[in-house]
Image (spheres, rainbow, N blue to C red):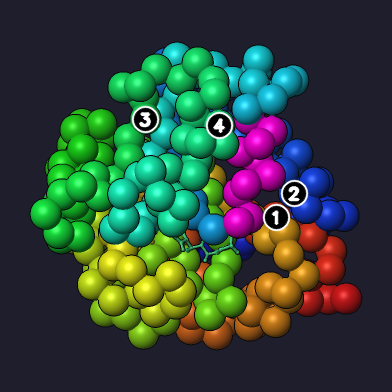
Amino acid sequence: MTAKKPQIVIVADAAAVAEAAARRLLNRISHGNRAAVCLTGGSSPLGLYHLLASDPWRNQVPWDRVHWFVGDDRFVPESGPLSNMGTAKRIFLDRVPAPPQNIHPIPTDADSPDDAARLYEDELKRFYGAERLEPRRPMFDMVLMGLAPDGHVASLFPHSPALKEKERWVLGVAKAGMEPFVPRVTLTLPALAATGEMLFLIDNANRRPIFKRVLAGEDLPAHRAYAQGDLVWLAIRAAAPEQ
Ligand code: 6PG
């Protein structure tokens, strides 16, 4: 786990979460020849996705240089409403000048979640240019994360053996621990950690109890998440436990 203390950033409401996330994202992707962002599922990134598709944010993203991955997906067709990458595409990636080769969905048309995981791991390794993750060379500039009511992150559910995975970058998940109960494909904790910034988005007051448990150090997937770079919790005031 990281030695660095997580930063907690509290803002007024869901609109402010989206704005602050957009600012942080732009800051992370504005330098260098190439940038990589790992998207998340759920409802918490949707405000950010809408901002990225609209001005002034849309004009500020260096679309040619940014590559878009996803931290987990449901093993369903991309055209359906449950697909995390499908949702990101419909809300912003299909509406902006992002080159198609910069968009890296988990291949949910593979024969099985395990096959999709192997294919995605190969794709990540090709992109990263090495077979092993190097501690001081993050794969991503930013990894977005949501906090589920049961404390799961990506598709790493409480008590899952996948939480202990150290070698693999991507795994198939035959049984989801929460709705929707469809098989999943997920990045592992070390792969998600390979980032300059891991940004958790909490834009709903109903996440206050689980956020409190995570910050108190309970052994939940969200507490196990770590980052090579900064780990930031961006939350609305109504979800912050100190209230
Ligand atoms: C998924 C997600 C999942 C999500 C959390 C939080 O595919 O189900 O990636 O891990 O991020 O459930 O969801 P909300 O953003 O809706 O709170």
Residue 101 lies, in percent from the top left, at 31, 22
Mark 3, residues whose alpha carbon is within 10 Å: few (<14), some, or many (≥20)?
Answer: some
Disc 4 from disc 1: Cα separation: 21 Å
| Local secondary structure at mark 4 | loop
- Residue found at x 31% / y 55%: 76
Labels 1, 3: front one: 3
Residue toward you, 159 or 14: 14
- Residue found at x 46% / y 52%: 81
| Local secondary structure at mark 2 | helix
Disc 2 from disc 3: Cα separation: 24 Å
Horizontal side of residue 111 vs 58, given as left or right: left
Magenta span covers which residues?
43-52
Q: Tell me whether circle 1 and circle 2 mark residues in contact (CB < 8 Å).
A: yes
Q: Which is the main secondary structure of the residues drawn in magenta? A: helix
Residue 126 lies, in percent from the top left, at 19, 33
Q: Earlier in the sequence, mark 2 or mark 3?
A: 2
Disc 3 from disc 4: Cα separation: 12 Å
